[in-house]
Image (cartoon, rainbow, N blue to C red):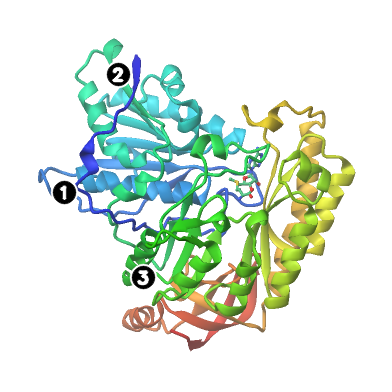
Amino acid sequence: MRVTVFNPISHSANKTPTNQGNPATTNSPVAVDGTETTESTDNKIIGIDVHEPVNAVTAEPAKKVFITTQGCQMNEYDSSKMGDVLGDSHGMEVTTNIDEADVLIMNTCSIREKAQEKVFSELGRWRKLKEKNPDLVIGVGGCVASQEGDSIQKRAPYVDMIFGPQTLHRLPELYDESTKQKAVKPKNRIGTVDVSFPSIEKFDFLPEPKVEGYKAFVSIMEGCSKYCSFCVVPYTRGEELSRPLDDVLAEIDSLAEQGVREINLLGQNVNGYRGEKDDGSICRFAELLHYVSYIDGVDRIRYTTSHPLEFTDDIIDAYGKLPQLPSHLHLPVQSGSNNVLAGMKRNHTIDVYINQINKLRAVRPDMHLSGDFIIGFPGETEEDFNETLQLAKDLDFDHSYSFVYSRRPGTPASDLPDDLPLTAKKERLAKFQKVIVDSTKAKTEAMVGQVHRVLVENVGNRFADHLHGTADNTRSVIFPVDASTEERFEAEKQRLMGKFVNIKITEYISSLLVKGELVEVIG
Ligand code: SAM
């Protein structure tokens, strides 16, 4: 198979340059890398059905696209956009049933080796589907695609489209090109590959989606310029680039009009945001938080993820001024040892975090912290590890996304000597996670008797006569409502869903779930 880098045409030129996003399907409010304290990197399926089942243009049955997502919230956001662009251009419908799909897309993550390995094992399964249905179009997007480019097609020649995080808006053209290639003899086919970094143009070509639910992600910047020694992101997503302020606010405005109450601002280092304003001046992150807080309906603003070197005092001040900022913060800590931080090229010492958190807690004494931690970075000694453990205890982290260091080819740390056996690293990780899990439980138990602000989102999963929502500290909360008849339950749903309410917590159910009673509707 010959491969060419796809040359974009103006397929999307007639699209409204709006930037609204679907809420992604995750329930995990701070899943920076899509996984919690275990090493699960299961694919997630974006299953939001945002389009009519019939192609509005051709009146033929709509083609169906099945999208799996690995990794972080940015990937989930991107996957929802892939569904949007194919819906908009080709009337495609997103399906969660792989057997009925005409197009399969894998949105990949290369942050750790395990996720990357899964790409080819999953593609092997997809190959069998394509053997049964040669018309099936298979696409690989995301960071593995960006890193591997056309070598994916060399290893898996049945893959039709390869695109990176910055070129997903060109999917309609890649799809058209792939379907044209079906008519060509296999050995003469040209694979369609576009893993370029065309600045930040994708946002100008994304269609306006219909939102479901009350929470939404909004990407405010792309890429990363920090070049930490362990991390592939700068190589797969490119350098940091911020979206203009007006674009971000227009997207949030539209989401708010559609009923969204909680916005999660996304980026690799959101507090490095430098968005251009209309007058050419630069808006920084703290100012953006203020702007977002003025948008009617948006009463909770979260963000994922920040960088310690950009955590300026004006952001801490915002916590004193903006009730929309919940008392929960996710921090990419990585290690509590200054030696390890230096090896990671984080360019700060642990005191920087300690000072920032102390200042934050002076403004918000009830601040809950979650963090990213890497255990077993090359050269990490027992003493270094104990410092990380101690930091987690001292700063009272109550949730973590912690993983054993994964060697990423092409990153500076991949050349460092690393003689600690994997079993020893895993033992450290288990020890670390036990401390965090105990803290999670203790903090959840302490909620009993307290009143918490909760955004009501849906009906309880296991508790069908309860409504379910999320507290500011990210815990799931269920509470009973009048379900004596279907009509009454329906009326309660109408009254409460999408509202912020105060709930008095009455019962601990599990480490991340509590039960309570409705005290009042805030609005
Ligand atoms: N703003 C974040 C920061 O300051 O580090 C960047 C988020 S990064 C893309 C997501 C998380 O993935 C990191 O915080 C880190 O804990 C984890 N990660 C990245 N590279 C890794 C590696 N090689 N091995 C294990 N975990 C890694």
* Residue 25 left/right relative to 414: left
Q: Position of residue 180 (x, y in %)?
A: 20, 25
Sooner in the amino-acid sequence: mark 2 or mark 3: 2
Q: Identify the residue at image location x=56%, y=38%.
A: 234
Q: Mark 3 points at which residue?
A: 256
Q: How far apart are marks 2 and 1 (CA)?
A: 30 Å
Residue at image point 47% right, 46% down: 75
Label 3 residue SS: helix
Q: Are marks 2 and 3 in contact (CB under 8 Å)?
A: no
Q: Disc 2 marks which residue?
A: 190
Seen as rendered, the residue at the extreme bottom is 520
Instruction: Indicate which disc residue 443 carries.
Output: none
Rendered-image quadrant of the C terminus:
bottom left
Position of 307 with respect to 34 (left or right) is: right
The three-letter code of the residue at mark 3 reads: Ala
In the rendered view, would you say 420 is above or below 240?
Answer: above
Tell me, yes or no, whether the two marked residues, 3 and 1, touch with CB atoms within 8 Å.
Answer: no
The residue identified by callout 1 is 54
Dot 1 lies on which element? Answer: loop
Q: Is mark 3 within 8 Å of ligand 1?
A: no
- Tell me the distance, in whole angstroms, between the alpha carbons under discs 3 and 1: 28 Å
Quadrant for ligand 1? top right
Q: Earlier in the sequence, mark 2 or mark 1?
A: 1
Q: In this view, does 264 lie above or below 346?
A: below
Q: Residues within 10 Å of mark 1 (few under 14, many from 20)?
A: some
Quarter containing the N terminus: top left
Element at badge 2? strand
| Nearest to the observer: residue 175 or residue 133 | 175
Say which of 406 and 461 sits in front.
406
Looking at the image, which residue is at 88% across and 42% down? Answer: 382
